[in-house]
Image (spheres, grey):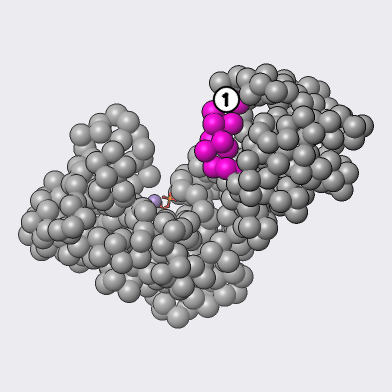
Amino acid sequence: MNVFEYQARSLLARYGMPIPAGDVATTPEEARQVAVVLTDGPFVVKSQILAGGRGKGRFLNGFVGGVRLCSDANQVEEVARAMLGGVLVTRQTGPEGRRVDRVLVAKAPRILRELYLAILIDRECRCPVVMGSARGGVDIEEVAREDPEAIHRIRVDPQMGLWPYQARELGLRMGLRGPLLLQAADAIARLYHFFCDCDASLAEINPLAVVEDGKLAVIDAKVSFDENGLFRHPEIARYRTEVIEDGREAEATKAGLNYVGLSGDIGCMVNGAGLAMATMDILHRYGGTPANFLDVGGGADQDQVTKGFGILMKDPRVRAIFVHIFGGILRCDVIARGIVDAVSQVMPKVPIVVRLQGTNLEEGRAILRRSGMSIRTADDLADAAQMAVAAAKEPR
Ligand code: GDP
Ligand code: MN
């Protein structure tokens, strides 16, 4: 689960990370008030969306920059008015962009150098890895591509934790010396502490900046949490309700469905996570792209199938629906009845391809056939997947 920058900042501040003072605002007047309380400028006004690249972003109405420096409270209000309610497009949002409903207003220190610092779980070496670079800032992706050596990595043994010498070594490789090196080692240790304590899966500070007065400052923070650990952190879990990441996902969570929104055009309804993954793989193999991952559960009942159809149908991306269900715990005839009922309730306007397998397959097929609905069926997985891919390409 991703959280907004202003939320990440308040969590990191509790761990003693050097965060410039600031606060979130939802109206231009509130933004001005935050600036007034911070007293003198310069300030920075930052669009709060769950995507990066804001600095180089542009609003659909032409306003340039999702992150803007301002010299006084008047200008903060003006910039906040331009951002709030606008749609910001960055290289991470896709062309449709994201609506900006809140802005962060913070003190903007003068930046001398921009560094990069991140902790994530490296699945390959099965441990947390701390990454640091002297070349942080908005072009970090290019640095990673063109000069990967410039990004240094330190593996942490989760049993032993991060040793102080490891933090100092990384600080050195980030080009820091003297008091700045000690500050960096301290910040790295604090970030690691936060990362473990809060069950984070990613904590990225880009840039971590060397600012005036020889201090370090967290200028931008991106944090995600392992959802399986959220029950241990009610305070962080509360952010979830505030974070409307994907309307589709919010609704599916309410219905108790296991759903991940994707950007393709084939709406998938599958039972069991393994089968769902295999279904997405085979759609890709035949040149299709799934609009979602939806696992209605091994013991899916009719209610869940109906809710699943509802979510798929509300998604304007979906040009075909592929129902792929294995009748194990639930028999195929029960599932087929569920599908027929769901279709008659929801009345999808796009082609539906169904592949059933398992117990009482024959009865299930007969029910689909007798329904008189235009439900396309296939026995073989490859055939079914190709039908779904073709169906999504049909003109509507
Ligand atoms: P991102 O583009 O979404 O990663 O947003 P960032 O918060 O990283 O801001 C992008 C860039 O704007 C940074 O790399 C800085 O160069 C600049 N910037 C952001 N905040 C400040 C600030 O407080 N002071 C100064 N001087 N520059 C800032
Ligand atoms: Mn950044």
Quadrant including the C terminus: top right
Along the horizontal axis of the image, is 315 left or right of 104? Answer: right
Give neighbour class at mark 1: few <14, some 14-19, many 20+ (Cα, 10 Å).
Answer: some
Decide which of 90, 275 is in the foreground and name it: 275
Decide which of 212, 191 is in the foreground and name it: 191
Decide which of 130, 359 is in the foreground and name it: 359
Q: What is the three-letter code of the residue carrying label 1?
A: Ile
Quick check: can you spot residue 104? Answer: yes
Q: Is mark 1 within 8 Å of ligand 1?
A: no
What residue span does the magenta drawing correspond to?
Answer: 270-284
Residue farthest to the bottom, as pictured: 37
In the image, residue 320 lies in the stretch drawn in magenta = no
Decide which of 335, 96 is in the foreground and name it: 335
Q: Which residue is mark 1?
A: 282
The structure residue drawn at horizontal position 66% and vertical position 33%, both measured from the top left corner, is 358
In the image, residue 140 lies at what x, y percent?
33, 41
